[in-house]
Image (cartoon, rainbow, N blue to C red):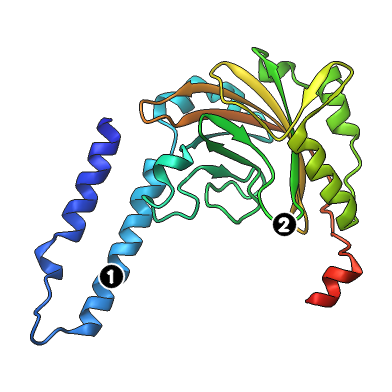
């Protein structure tokens, strides 16, 4: 709670600073606009720092993070921070290709209601599986639970993409391995996701929840297993004509 209290205190001081007091009789709108712009920029910088993993988290995985295609990040619970932070999505999302928590930039994973989920807009979808307590260095494309996701052929027709959306929403099993678009968020558990964001990315990523912070946020380390060619969606004639 200390970090959250500090963050709230900074916001209070920023917005209650005497320098932005408004003279009700003769407001200087240009000055007010400059002050608001300055505050927004300052808020963005504070949020960037707030969402970073703690230095000790990065230090604990320093050796792993020296490997290419690896990273560490924090996910904030959407129900707590969406609308509280200026960042779109409240820091509950992450893009493994653009390395950002801000929603709308090829988001691949979301934390909400103590669950991790994939697939968020349009025909985009993701397939997720939970491996349990498996170290990331042990996760490879030839692992039985990963093999299906590695060999999966991304559909290019919108009708086929919608079928996949419904399939992962219901969940399915291949060779006794469960796949769906949502699993509980558990510390010391490893997951693998095939995330398809049409026109942006198609990736296979393994990630592990290594810690839960006091505010419910998760510290996650990850590694890119495969980047596939960026898929372009062939929209149905009915949809194309309506646009």
Which residue is depicted at the point 57% across and 30% down?
Answer: 115
Q: Where 19 falls versus 98 (above or below)?
A: below
Which residue is depicted at the point 29% across and 35% down?
Answer: 3
Q: Residues within 10 Å of mark 2 (few under 14, many from 20)?
A: few
Return the residue at label 2.
122
> Which secondary structure, mark 2?
loop
Q: Where 163 falls versus 215 (above or below)?
A: below
Q: Residues within 10 Å of mark 1 (few under 14, many from 20)?
A: some
Q: Nearer the viewer, residue 106 or 79?
A: 79
Return the residue at label 1.
36
Q: Nearer the viewer, residue 84 or 236?
A: 236
Q: Quadrant of residue 42?
A: bottom left
Which residue is depicted at the point 53% across and 24% down?
Answer: 62
Q: Where does the image place residue 9, in percent across and percent down from the top left?
A: 19, 45
Q: Where 220 falls versus 27 (above or below)?
A: above
Position of the N terminus by quadrant: top left
Q: Where 134 falls versus 66 (above or below)?
A: above
Q: Tell me the mark number nearer the camera, choosing from 1 and 2.
A: 2
Q: Where does the image place residue 227, in percent across and percent down from the top left?
A: 79, 42
Furthest residue in direction top, as rendered = 133
> Which secondary structure, mark 1?
helix
Position of the C terminus by quadrant: bottom right
- Residue 143 shows up from this direction: no
């Amino acid at each position: 709670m200390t970090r959250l209290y500090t963050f709230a205190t900074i916001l209070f001081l920023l917005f209650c600073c005497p320098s932005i007091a408004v003279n009700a009789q003769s407001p200087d709108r240009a000055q007010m606009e400059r002050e608001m712009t300055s505050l927004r920029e300052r808020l963005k910088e504070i949020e960037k720092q707030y969402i970073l993993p703690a230095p000790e988290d990065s230090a604990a995985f320093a050796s792993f993070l020296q490997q290419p295609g690896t990273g560490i990040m924090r996910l904030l619970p959407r129900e707590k921070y969406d609308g509280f932070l200026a960042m779109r999505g409240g820091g509950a999302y992450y893009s493994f290709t653009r390395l950002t928590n801000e929603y709308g930039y090829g988001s691949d994973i979301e934390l909400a209601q103590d669950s991790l989920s994939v697939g968020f807009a349009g025909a985009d979808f993701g397939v997720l599986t939970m491996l349990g307590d498996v170290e990331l260095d042990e996760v490879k494309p030839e692992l039985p639970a990963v093999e299906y996701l590695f060999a999966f052929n991304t559909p290019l027709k919108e009708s086929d993409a919608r079928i996949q959306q419904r399939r992962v929403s219901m969940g399915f099993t291949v060779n006794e391995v469960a796949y769906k678009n949502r699993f509980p968020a558990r510390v010391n558990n490893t997951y693998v996701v095939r995330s398809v964001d049409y026109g942006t990315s198609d990736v296979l990523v393994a990630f592990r929840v290594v810690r839960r912070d006091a505010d419910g946020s998760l510290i996650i380390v990850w590694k890119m297993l495969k980047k596939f060619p960026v898929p372009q969606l062939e929209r149905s004639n009915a949809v194309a004509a309506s646009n």
